[in-house]
Image: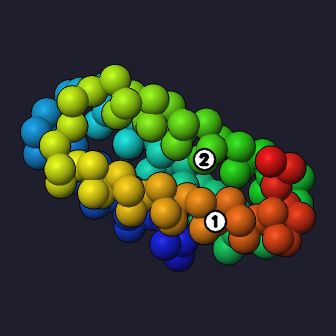
């Protein structure tokens, strides 16, 4: 499994603890779903174009969440959890660039 998936779930739980119906919670849930789908595509050995499209969905969800959190006043726990998500996301992005899957 991708390291990104558990990091997103931890962030989602932090956000949900404060406000289950917030825009940030919804964005985190969408990112988790996109990361799960991407992980499934990796496990199914999809071709490079399928992986690229799947990662683009993850990237869009990540940036939407980042924008939402930038607009919100989040606490230290949520900020720390998002820093973990960012680190895992950037590691994934670098790995995909290394494998020439992503055209970032």
Residues packed near mark 1 inside 10 Å, few (<14), some (14 to 19) or many (20 plus): some
Image position, residue 50 (x, y; %): 82, 53
Is residue 41 shown above or below 57?
Answer: below
Q: Which mark is residue 58?
A: 2
Q: Residue at x 89, y 64 (%)?
A: 100
Q: Is residue 77 above or below residue 61?
A: below
Q: Is residue 97 above or below residue 103?
A: below
Q: Residue furthest left?
A: 18
Q: Nearer the viewer, mark 1 or mark 2?
A: 1
Q: Is residue 69 visible?
A: yes
Quarter-wise, where is residue 16 in the image?
A: top left
Residue 33 in picture, x, y percent from top left:
48, 48
The answer to whether the residue labelled 1 contacts the one labelled 2, judged by CB atoms less than 8 Å apart, is yes
Q: Which mark is residue 44?
A: none
Tell me residue 83's x, y (percent).
Answer: 38, 56
Residue at 10 percent of width and 39 percent of height: 18
- Callout 1 secondary element: helix
Q: Of marks 1 and 2, which one's residue comes earlier in the chain?
A: 2
Residue designated by label 1: 92
Can I make out residue 50 in this image?
no
Q: Is residue 64 left or right of residue 47?
A: left
């Amino acid at each position: 499994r991708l390291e990104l998936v558990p990091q997103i779930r931890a962030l989602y739980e932090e956000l949900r603890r404060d406000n289950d119906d917030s825009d940030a919670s919804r964005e985190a849930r969408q990112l988790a779903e996109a990361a799960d789908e991407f992980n499934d595509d990796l496990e199914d050995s999809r071709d490079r174009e399928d992986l690229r499209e799947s990662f683009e969905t993850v990237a869009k969800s990540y940036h939407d969440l980042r924008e939402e959190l930038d607009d919100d006043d989040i606490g230290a726990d949520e900020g720390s959890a998002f820093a973990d998500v960012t680190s895992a996301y950037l590691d994934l992005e670098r790995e995909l660039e290394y494998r020439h899957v992503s055209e970032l």
